[in-house]
Image (cartoon, helix red, strand yellow):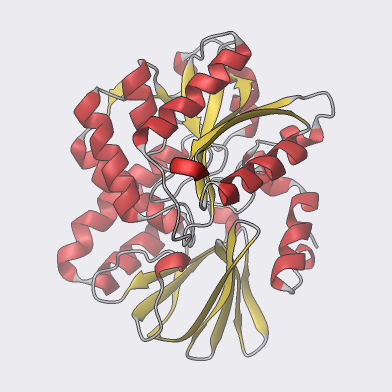
Amino acid sequence: MASYILSTADVQAAVLGGALLGGGGGGSLTQGSTMGELALAVGTPQLLSLDELADDDLLAVVALVGAPSAREQYLKPVHYIRAIELLQARLGRKLAGITTNENGAGTTVNGWFQAAMLGLPVIDAPSNGRAHPTGVMGSMGLQQDASYVSIQAAAGGRADKYIETVVSGSLTTCASLIRKASVEAGGLVAVARNPVTVRYAREHAACGAIGQALELGRLMLKQQTKGGDAVARAAMEFLGGKIICQGTVENVTLNMQGGFDVGTVEIKDYALTFWNEYMTLEQGGERLGTFPDLIMTLQRATGIPIPTAELQQGEEIILVHVPRQRLLLGAGMRDPQLFKPIEQVIGKPVLSYIFA
């Protein structure tokens, strides 16, 4: 891929396609649209592939950490920039590019504003091609390198809840500290973390996943005038998934636990659990889908994806499922150790379905 200048049409496509690939998490469509449009208002963000950079060039991952439903969250554009500034100050070295941690309505375009303001390119090598709950899952397998020292910078909140911090140490410890910082900041922080070389990203990132979100979003936009059914069918054909059912959301439970949204959803005889993102899909006790499979809810009338934090009882939805084998996934999705916390949170087996 040569240098590609991102446009307003790309913002719409990235947010819509990213929302579906978010699998219930990855931020809100409103948040993504606002930040994407702001990026274009302040500069000309460029999207590059890793092929445009030298192997030893240094990249940083940007992320949003926190509970999407937190009512006291306060995150402004300055916080996104501040996180990058804090990280570069600790590194003492300028970055060659920025990449996002995952696909989602907000996270697919995360990095575009920072890139436009700082004169850096956006690199199409996200840590994961779908959204995931924990920071370690979006660390491209770095947790398996005992010698790697993680550096993570975060900013967010307002007034007496404002936080900016830089932590370094083991990857899991740093991820936990940043998660706690998000709670203290009111629920959400902007993060810049875990610098890696282009060489490392090429082997461990979900290369091309931003391009996939753009292509998916363009396809969904073309189908919107035909209604939600047409959007869902086109998206599932593109991703290699299927429509599970159409129906009314009969029950939703949502609780914030440790900086995460945790809950359940019932639609007809289907039961779903989520930990920010949808984790399991069952029918009559039979498991039909397990994270990192993509499980998602879309508005029945429009086909617009609905994150777990925004799903309401009584809403008419389309439920879809894409097997994990059809997704672009980073190295964090191949480590069984990272899936154990899911079982503890949702109280259901996960490892046996993924790594049997």
Instruction: Classify residue 34 as left or right of residue 236.
Output: left
Residue 266's x, y, as percent?
51, 85
Say which quarter of the image contains residue 168.
Answer: top right
Camera-side residue of 164 and 209: 164
Residue 111 visible in the shown view: no
Residue 61 image point, x, y percent: 54, 30
The residue that appears at 28% across and 31% down in the rendered structure is 39
Q: Residue furthest left?
A: 225
Of residues 352 and 196, the one drawn nearer to the viewer in this rendering: 196
The extreme front residue here reads: 160
**Which is nearer the eye, 229 or 38?**
38
Tell whether 130 sits left or right of 3.
right
Residue 183: x, y in percent? 58, 51
Q: In this view, does 208 lie to the left or right of 176?
A: left
Q: In which quarter of the image is the C terminus?
A: bottom right
Q: Quadrant of the N terminus?
A: top left
* 40 to the left or right of 322: left
Query: Vertical placement of 8 versus 316: above or below?
Result: above
Q: Who is closer to the viewer here, 170 or 6?
A: 170
Q: How many marks?
A: 0
Q: Is residue 21 above or below residue 65?
A: below
Identify the residue at image location x=41%, y=47%.
74
Residue at 47% from the left image edge and 52% from the top image edge: 26
Give above or below for 161 relative to 294. Answer: above
> Is residue 11 visible to the viewer in this orientation of the structure?
yes
Rendered residue at 25%/22% (across/down) = 44
Q: Position of residue 311 (x, y in %)?
A: 41, 73
